[in-house]
Amino acid sequence: DTWAGTYECPVGGEAYSAAFLVSRAALTRPVVLVNESRVRGKMGNMEAASYVVMHASAKVKTVDLLDFFVVHLSWYERLLNRDGPALRPRVLARLAKQKPRPAAGAGATDRVVVVMPFYASSGHSTRDSGHSAFDSRKASLKATVDSLKPVFPRYTVTVCSKADYDYVTTTPGLDFYDVRTYYEIGKPAMLGVATVFTAQQALRTDPRWKQFTHVFYTESDQVLYVRDVGHLVRLASKRMNDRKKLPIMVIPHRVQPAPRREDAGPEPIAWPPKFNVAKELRARRGKTDGHWAHAAAHGVDGGAGAEAAAAE
């Protein structure tokens, strides 16, 4: 037995990984139920999906990172910066060849339902969004699904655009147990909260969700690695043995991959034009100087314009 135990995270920011495992009862408590007006609003971000549950839960992680962790794929692309367009085809080709290998004896359970947001298109079939290109988001979704199948085979997705709905319902190999939609969303960044909201509604009203005892929330660009599903599910079924008796929220570690030169493969590579740091700084300095000149002329922040106005 390699189980090394767990520890409690007192601070949400320390614990955050854009993924968590909780019991059905923990996610449907009145104190964590998402109000629909919040989903339709524009105040919030993707991280809020975790924090709406964190504030009323005991946040626990495994001592050994390898017992429960996710690999955040879009972070890799984000670090490519301006080289992304040149390297993306090579990176996606490598990702397509990689197959997650669950730990021996990890087990699988169909009593856990996976919920995740997926946003790749605002209605334009090739439009990029956020930090990732459209093709990257599709590849990351496939990698995420492939990692879920051996562990949590009942995985679902929530989308907020018709283009994304068409993609997740017609693409071979995705095979979602359920596809939830929320088209009236305030902004795409609220899709995480919308995913929690639609999951709570399904757990309370949808007969297809009656069998589920636990919920695993994740994002659609996170490859899952688990050593022992049974340990995690049993842990998420408990409450902390302290005064508050809060239900336990098991949070995986989050690994942020970094690009290496060898990932890109051999030359030639169609690199973008060389970035001239000095030229960019001069351009920004000129804009800044122009801003303050304008401010002074109009008496902003006590500039010369203010003095002239006072003299008049």
Image (tube, rainbow, N blue to C red):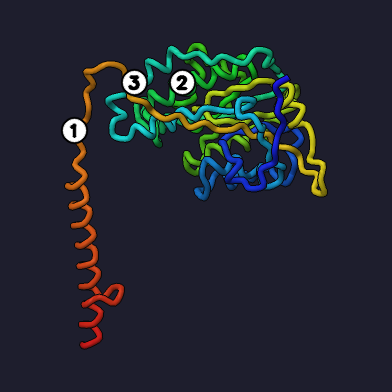
Q: What residue is disc 1 on? A: 273
x%, y% of residue 214?
Answer: 72, 28
Q: Which residue is drawn at 50% across and 44% down?
A: 186
Q: Which residue is drawn at 49% across and 18% down?
A: 142
In the image, is residue 16 above or below residue 230?
Answer: below
Q: Is residue 65 left or right of residue 27?
A: left
Q: What residue is disc 3 on? A: 262
The disc placed on residue 243 is none
Number of callouts: 3
What's the residue type where badge 1 is placed? Pro
In the image, is residue 267 above or below residue 83?
Answer: above
* Near-viewer residue (261 or 27): 261
Q: What residue is disc 2 on? A: 167
Q: How far apart are marks 3 and 2 (CA)?
A: 32 Å
Q: Which residue is drawn at 41% across and 33% down?
A: 122
x%, y% of residue 11?
Answer: 63, 48
Q: Pick whichever of labels 2 and 1 is earlier in the sequence.
A: 2
x%, y% of residue 261?
Answer: 33, 24
